[in-house]
Image (spheres, grey):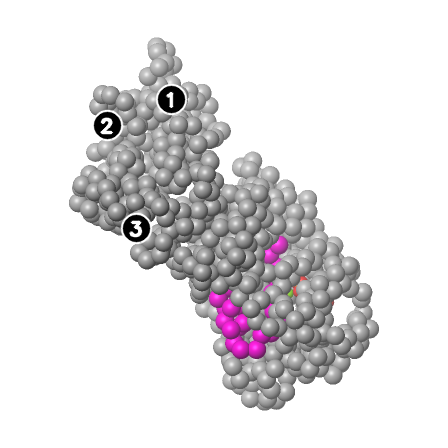
Amino acid sequence: MGKGRSRAEARRASQAGQVSCTSPNARTARSLSPDASLTPITAPLASLDFLGAKEVISLASAGLHVAGDLLDWLPRRYEDRRRFDAFPAAPGGPAICVRGKVVDTRNRFGPRARFYEAVVEDTRSSGMGTATITCRWFNMPFLKNVIAAGQEVILHGKPKDFQGRIYIDHPDFEVIRDDGGPSIHLERIVPIYRNVSGIAQRRLREIQHQLLERIDPASLGSPYDVDPTYPRAEAFREVHFPEAIEQAEAARRRFALEEFFAVQLNVVWRRARIHDHKGRVQGTKTTLLKRFYESLPFDLTGAQKRSIKEIVADLRSPRPMNRLLQGDVGSGKTFVAMASMLLAIDSGAQAALMAPTQILAEQHYLTFKRWLEPLGVRVLLRTAAKEQSTHLPLDGEAQVLIGTHALLYDKVAFTDLGLVVIDEQHKFGVSQRSRLIDQGTMPDVLVMTATPIPRTLTMTIYGDLDVSILDERPAGRGKMVTALRTAAKQTDITKFVKEQLATGRQAYLVYPLVEESEALKAESATEAFEKWQKRLSGHSVGLVHGKLSPEEKEDVMRRFRDGEIHALVATTVIEVGVDVPNANLMIIHHAERFGLAQLHQLRGRIGRGEHKSYCILLTDGKSADAMEKLAVMEKTSDGFVIAEEDLRLRGPGDVLGTMQSGLGDLRFPDFLADTALLREARALADQVIAEDPSLAALHASLRSLIQENPVASSQRG
Ligand code: ADP
Ligand code: MG
């Protein structure tokens, strides 16, 4: 969910005033005979007698203020301390959890950093060749006060090899203390939490345990109980201190369902709000569309035809259209948009196209003019720059108006807006969309995105939209070759770039970072820029990255588009970019550092003209995972296949993160691949809205979950 409202806030709101749907009886019972010994979920942490004042401060700086915040601080993983792993004989493999004794510690100084080392010995082994693991913590000298020889510890981390020894860098660790009696720290499955600075793992676990014993179960209701058969109090106990891993999983599923329900409720709510409006019936006249088809030098692809058909049905229906057109770069979305706009225009309305940047708006303007003006359609570009709008006719005369998102805030631009096309949705927040829709007349809306996403994620992110998919590439493109290289020599690369530039083509030279970073050891774009200037002397080399101002970026991109710059050293800022059909070569350095979806997006910058194109992925070949990932790029150019692979390899959390979906706060992103759970959440939300469309009666408390003004997702680059 967006940052607008946290679960905790929603909960507080629902408990301050409204009756909880979960347990009205329990609530009444509590107010009749309050059990003073129990802690309500709203109790300030400062009021809990088992917390020290310093601890309360530490918790507050982690954003934990009331009892419920602590309960919501869920374990990030569990350790089964009924059995430990054996000390590894060799490095590599997954993370391990071992128990051993610290036999030596020291502060060390390396060339780049100082670090604290602890050698931990396997206490179960004996005699010759005792197994040890060395732990390293960089720049944390104070650890010498925490870890000392003689202690028994539990370590968790990935064993690595360094100069013939087995190391774990920055392991999770916990010092074992025997205070007699049964322990919540040993001989069971224990929760490991995200760190709260100032509070040790062990202490945090004790705090959670104590809180769970004190918490008033009657106060644990949520505004809507997604699973009455599984009380929340029980789920909280089982997620923090499970008897079996399956219990923790079931509890997480329950909480995930709650969370997805809130997302879907918003989605269904927005959809219902759109359908509250009466849309216009348009698109019955097809004269312009027929002339457009006749003017095209190519046939539309099957996918384009299918999408246009779906759009036509929406336009003709009295319900407002709210449709997403998904398709790879170059799949022909723009032509679908043009066809749709012609239908609106033929019905006497205006159509608008909004692009995320000025330069993209200009590019669309030229394309639209080229194809639509011969049909007698007036196309205008509306820009922020004054000098550009003065010599243009009045906007009111425009039939197609093209601009940036600023168009949204411009009420006078339109006299009769019938259709809005929004390009590049992932740069465009939900709130902007609703703003447009709130602007009075209810235009039909078509959103285009070039980021294919797996279908399960579509349901979450674009659940309030109907979806059309362009999964077919138009014919007549130059061939595209993608090659993965692990040991390419710089001289060979330079030679290849020069050859392509010599034939008049242009090249992108992509780097993962803007500035040099010691930690990442990857060459940065700024460093590389200087080198490329020398290597390609005689050619003009440009540099673009996210630290430039928008104007500077656009200026460089414009010069590249116009052919003044031959080779462009760039970071990922080019992934949503200008169409430069003459650019046919892309070299992606440190390709392993990019996500699959990102690589695909980057590669989409080339292969747009008739020339054969080359995408070269450079990597050191050291990581098997990275090689598996990069091989996908060599195998396929289908954005949907790549998106599914990306989801499989990275998991939904990371995929969502880079998509800037506005769902970054989801606590259970890992369940997003779980179609069944998503469908269940959707069905519950559908049911609630069907029973009580405005959430005014039956489910009034659920209004607290609705984000009226969701925060737009932040921009990337
Ligand atoms: P997108 O907006 O999806 O990136 P465009 O609509 O800009 O794609 O189309 C990319 C290129 O493909 C354009 O140069 C366009 O002229 C061409 N094109 C679009 N549709 C077809 C088609 N059906 N057959 C051949 N070329 C097409
Ligand atoms: Mg496009």
Residue 135 in picture, x, y percent from top left: 34, 30
Q: Is residue 105 above or below residue 39?
A: above
Residue 40 in picture, x, y percent from top left: 27, 45
Residue bearing the label numbered 1 = 82
Mark sitting earlier along the chain (1/3)? 3
Residue occupying the point 32% across, 41% down: 217
Mark 3 element type? loop
Tell me the CA gap for discs 2 and 3: 32 Å
The residue lying furthest to the right in this view is: 294
Tell me the quarter of the picture where residue 110 sits.
top left
Mark 2 element type? loop
Q: Which residues are drawn in magenta?
A: 427-452
Residue occupying the point 68% across, 47% down: 636
Which amino acid type is marked by label 2?
A: Ala
Mark sitting earlier along the chain (2/1)? 1
Residue occupying the point 35% across, 11% down: 126
Residue bearing the label numbered 3 = 63
Which amino acid type is marked by label 1?
A: Arg
Camera sees residue 510: no
Which marked residue is nearer to the observer: mark 2 or mark 3?
A: 3
Which amino acid type is marked by label 3?
A: Gly
Q: Are marks 1 and 3 in contact (CB under 8 Å)?
A: no
Residue bearing the label numbered 2 = 148
Q: Is residue 616 above or below residue 183?
A: below
